[in-house]
Image (spheres, helix red, strand yellow):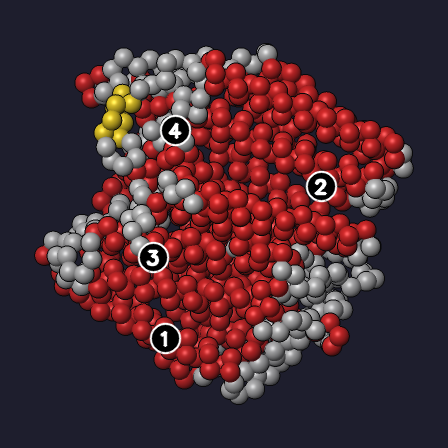
Amino acid sequence: MSNATAVHHDAHDAHPTGIMRWLTTTNHKDIGTMYLTFSLIMFLVGGSMILGVRAELFKPGLQLMRPEFFNQLIGVHALVMIFAALMPAATGFANWMLPLQIGAPDMALPRLNNWGFWLLPPAAILLTLPFTLALFGIGDGAVATGWTMYAPLSVQGGIGVDFAIFSVHLLGISSVLGSINVIVTILNMRAPGMTLMKMPMFAWGWLITAFLLIATIPVLAGAVTMLLTDRHFGTHFFDAAGGGDPILFQHLFWFFGHPEVYILLLPVWGFMPQILQTFSRKPMYGYKAQVYSLWAIGALSVVVWAHHFFTVGMPVPALLYFMYSTMSISLPLAVLFYCWIATIWKGSLSFETPMLFAVGWIILFGIGGLTGLVLADVAADAQYHHSYFVVAHFHYTLFAGGIMGIMAGVYYWLPKMTGHMYNEKLGKIHFWLTAISFNMTFIPQFFLGLAGMPRRIPDYALQFAEFNMISSIAAFALGLSQLLFVYNIIMCVRGGKKATDKVWEGAQGLEWTLPSPPPYHSFTEQPTIK
Amino acid sequence: MSSQTHNHSHHYYVPNPVAYPVILSLGLLTLASGFIFKINNYPAGRWMMIAGALIILSMVFSWMGKVISESETGMFKSWEDKSFRVGMIVFISSEVAFFAAFFGALFFMRVISVPELAHFDPNYTMYKDFVASWPSIGPGGNVIRFGGALETYKPAANFTPMAAWGLPAVNTLLLLSSGVTVTWAHWGLIKNNRNQLIIGLFLTVALGISFLICQATEYHHAYTEMGLTLGAGAYGSSFFMLTGFHGFHVLLGTIMLIVILIRSIKGHFTADRHFGFEGVAWYWHFVDVVWLGLFVFVYWL
């Protein structure tokens, strides 16, 4: 693809050591590492919270916690997983890999890049601090409204809601800064000769993600600001007595919330074809079709939001519009699935851990997509809405489609980032344990939902007992399996078999032309793309 | 969107490690937690807010100062310049989305929720006598307030809506003129007429400050004589949130204009390289355009 040469500028490698290196860094790899580490830590934090929930749901009745605390765990679990685990993981990959893949010396705005990361720990502190404050008699715990923070519940909620509002603000600033950086880097920092249509698919996925973030995150910021003023400063945006409407909050929230799903998934759709082509040892199928489909999905995602609250009471024409527009997303998504499968079709496949995750991802994310189609049907949704069917559906999209996709990326790029091979055998065991326990956790939840079990309730009728017991046991297996993942990463960072520059036999792209690990400043001289 | 052919003759400027961002984030954390404590009746929050604000101000001042000195020592060439331009355009786009949320709320309440509240079946509504109109204070009645206690909601004694063709029209004139003066200053900069640059910027700052004074007068009038407050139903909520956030942006824009005025007086910016000036000018035009939307949809129609 190119005649890239990595130029070592030892003089430029000087940087502070110890904690100051990480606090003050402007280097895209350091910042990427911080994002990925933060994401892994918060993944474990969010996971522990939901294990508390699954423990409570192990059998009917209230065993372990007050319902209020149960609600707090559920809401904070979701916010942590979405904003502090999945999004930072994608941003971490963007930081590490975008400059390497497009032949740039660094991200375009390195100081803003550092700020974007360092807004995240304060946001995580704001989100979880109320748990601790409650122990000291300040307030009544964290936000207990679910991650959607619907009014009027959130207008009546305690101090935890205020902390969540400002946490969202900091996360929003961080996302906007990250998006500005990605857009500028992709548009202005590509190596000479790398036209947009020669870019790696990961760059396309992230470019569209960044545009979606710019269009929607500020709307969420506006919505929670109105929530804040409704709570404390007497406005009536979400209060019918003043002419406002609680449903207005749902519109504003999901105008952000639906594109957010694609914000979480588009980066994965970007690098997944690269993994598939690597382990199929043939070129990606349908590059242009994939790029156009990503754009189509990005554009459609901002006009379909109301399918998240079909049951709230909307005029029939609105229901029909949101149903058909939602279903139309399955057309470009089907094109993507076709291209992914066609990429591995008749390839010389080998199943190293990243490929196992990638193929498992196609199947499991496919289930997530198809169950979404069922939920998009207005009539059927009246039955499924707010049931465990929805919970199972979005975990197939966000855990299988998001987290397992990220894991594929971690195993794929870890040798490049650390210079060592991870333990392949442990990686494969991790995949199988994850895939099996994930399905064991969430397949029962489809049935629970179809049978009418509502989400977000700490107790349930006796008829749901067996499925919940299976789901809880499997959830603990799923959670514990992730310790293997953490162990494997730590061992890989600390040592292991030396990785070659190319790492994978079929690897394609600029990042594989650099040494493993790449020098601190990679492309000081830009490569030329023919 | 065609192929990129430039051949960069120098290395892209990657700044050395800095501590501003992480301290700035700490300042934001302190300010936000202090504010949360204060509005939840923990008075210590006020001191946290002051500490946070001081940290933020000092960091912004140092960070911007550093960028200005880098700019003046010639660290930024056309490659970096393009990064700043694209970045500024994307940032302003995110601001557009932020205002869109509040305009969306205004349209939703005016077109959907207020009319709906008046058209319920009288047997099933507590707002039997409510007639939809705009401006609206809403139907009133009982409302559950913070803490869960049911208390009687007293609609503010009816208010007078803000008339478009008084102070708001003057404000429109002020902002539109300021758009002209900042462009005139830009022309001065391009043809190396430093006096025109400085006078143009000075006039723009003066117009911005006049706008803020008019708006403060208008707010004072609204609160003391017209009964128009944040609590005045759908109209009061959307009126103050939209004009308030816009006013805040005018304030920021004016401060930014003052900075580039001082820089111009010090002899910064050249005819062919002046992103600092243009970024502020773009921001000012954006604030101007938002105002036109406000004037039409909040004040006039």
CA gap between label 4 and label 3 equals 29 Å
User: Label 3: which residue?
Assistant: A132
Dot 3: chain letter: A
* Image quadrant assignment for residue B91: top right
Q: Amino acid at mark 2?
A: Gly
User: Label 2: which residue?
Assistant: B279
In the drawing, does residue B299 fall left or right of residue A480? right
* Residue ID at (80%, 60%): B8
Mark 4 and mark 3 lie on one chain; the one further toward the N terminus is 3
User: Label 4: which residue?
Assistant: A234
Where's residue A277, x and y in %? 53, 70
Image: A490 above or below A365: below
Q: Amino acid at mark 1?
A: Leu
Where's residue A102, x and y in %? 66, 64
Dot 1: chain letter: A
Disc number lying in front (2 or 4): 4
In the drawing, does residue B69 fall left or right of residue B211? right
Where's residue B147, x and y in %? 27, 37
Q: Amino acid at mark 3?
A: Thr
- Callout 4 secondary element: loop
The N terminus of chain A lies in which quarter of the figure? bottom right
User: Label 1: which residue?
Assistant: A483
Mark 3: few, some, or many residues within 10 Å (few <14, many ≥20)? some
